[in-house]
Amino acid sequence: MQLYELNWPRVDELSRDIPIVIPIAALEQHGHHMPLFTDSLLLGEVVRRASAKLEHDTLFTPLMWFGNSEHHLDFPGTMTASPRAYLDLLKEMIENFLFHGFRRYVLFNGHGGNIVPSQQALFELRQEFRDSDDLLLLAATYWDMATPHADEFEQAQMGHACEWETSMMLALRPDLVGDYKNAPTVPFGSPFKPGYRGWVMKDRSVPGHVGIPSAATKEKGERLFSLFAEGTVQWLKRVVAWDGQSWDG
């Protein structure tokens, strides 16, 4: 179900155990060849496909396109909340439903920069509602819902305006994709592992992408959409079936 299609009495009639899925994405630069709204467009399509198969088992809110993208601000066009404001925004969106007694929540993400804030927001909420033993607070990212076969792709993981994202945009909105064939390969890099280095995007990439955009195809994009949408459906079914107490779904 889509929240924007319902009136308030219909929402009030819902079981308080229905999962509330809040899609979160971003509006930020995606290299020379991809539109600023890439993350939101791709997540929106995954959600569209998944929600069509879940019927009345799950309630989806409208996609929140305003994300945590400060590390992309060196590239014009990026819009972002400050990190603390974004954490509070995520918490408050959930608190709107907590006020009415709903118990299962998913921050469903489509932007790498949202991963840590979404997890932290849920951590803080759990401390505030520590006596609510039947409260389920989950953060998930769509590209973790399935593992593409290695022999189908040049990349083994999601990048930024990369083979995977460019392929998906070619399947969804090819009219918005620029000259990806001549985009240089930008390695992912991990020179400080097992340590973690704080970074901004210009530290990693001059053109603003990471990965192998030139390997993208429309067919790969459709394959990725199918995998991620189906994986999302199966995972959300586990959320629906949760027994209300156990750690494992």
Image (cartoon, rainbow, N blue to C red):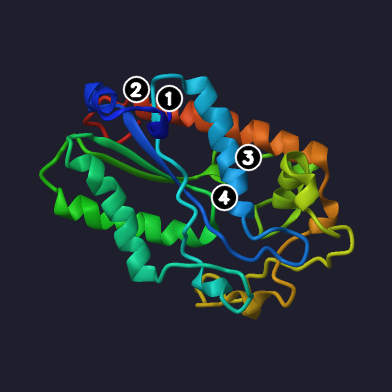
- Left or right: where 144 falls relative to 24: right
- Three-letter amino acid code at disc 3? Thr
- Three-letter amino acid code at disc 1? Lys
**Residue at left offset 63%, top offset 80%:** 203
Q: Which residue is mark 2?
A: 241
Q: Which residue is mark 4?
A: 40
Q: Residues within 10 Å of mark 2 (few under 14, many from 20)?
A: some
Q: Which residue is mark 3?
A: 147
If you read the primary sequence from the N terminus, does the residue marked by circle 3 or circle 2 appear first? 3
**Is the residue 217 above or below the residue 240 in the image?**
below
SS for callout 2: helix
Quote the CA–CA distance across marks 3 and 4: 21 Å
SS for callout 1: helix
**Residue at left offset 34%, top offset 22%:** 241
**Is the residue 27 above or below the residue 141 in the image?**
below
If you read the primary sequence from the N terminus, does the residue marked by circle 3 or circle 4 appear first? 4
Whether tag 3 and tag 2 are in contact, CB under 8 A, the answer is no
Whether tag 3 and tag 4 are in contact, CB under 8 A, the answer is no
Residue 194: x and y in percent read 52, 70
Q: Which residue is mark 1?
A: 237
